[in-house]
Image: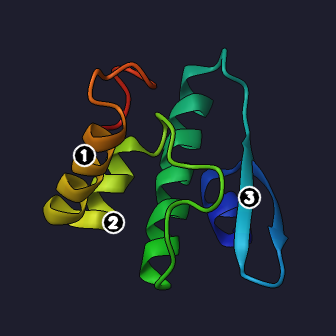
């Protein structure tokens, strides 16, 4: 995280669950500054890539969300993503829960 923060010239705070290695990085940036916002997005992508390279996952107990949407496909692949869609369809056949999001 320190290397990524330095590379993108941002502050990235990280807390974690030491028992399972689950980290919660927080990229600090000025959302009114387009250049800083772009660097923040790039740093986030670097963090996600690092997690996968180390054999981890892009998510833990908090789910995927909109920001990690593209990363879910990279982690699970087409077959894994289709399985997720089928599970969602089984439990939410009318598409009422979290419409228009990841699946």
Q: What whole-number distance in Å separates the C-alpha atoms at marks 3 and 2? A: 18 Å
Using the rendered view, name the quadrant where residue 73 is placed: bottom left
Element marked by disc 3: strand
Q: Which residue is mark 3?
A: 24
Mark 3: give few (<14), some (14-19) or many (20+) Cα within 10 Å: some
Element marked by disc 1: helix
Q: Which residue is mark 2?
A: 75
Residue 66 at x, y percent in the picture:
46, 34
Q: How many numbered marks appear?
A: 3
Using the rendered view, name the quadrant where residue 32 is placed: top right
Viewer-nearest residue: 56 or 82: 82
Nearest to N terminus: mark 1 or mark 3: 3
Residue 84 at x, y percent in the picture:
29, 53
Viewer-nearest residue: 10 or 12: 12
Element marked by disc 2: helix
Viewer-nearest residue: 54 or 30: 54
Q: Which residue is mark 1?
A: 85
Nearest to N terminus: mark 3 or mark 2: 3
Going by the image, does 24 lie left or right of 55? Answer: right
Instruction: Name the residue located 46 percent from the left edge and 85 percent from the top edge.
Output: 55
């Amino acid at each position: 995280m320190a290397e990524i923060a330095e590379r993108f010239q941002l502050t990235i705070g990280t807390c974690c669950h030491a028992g399972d290695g689950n980290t919660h990085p927080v990229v600090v940036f000025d959302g009114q500054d387009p250049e800083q916002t772009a660097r923040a997005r790039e740093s986030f992508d670097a963090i996600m890539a690092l997690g996968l390279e180390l054999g981890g996952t892009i998510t833990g107990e908090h789910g995927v969300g909109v920001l990690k949407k593209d990363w879910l496909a990279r982690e699970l692949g087409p077959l894994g993503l289709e399985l997720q869609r089928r599970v969602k369809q089984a439990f939410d056949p009318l598409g009422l829960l979290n419409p228009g999001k990841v699946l």
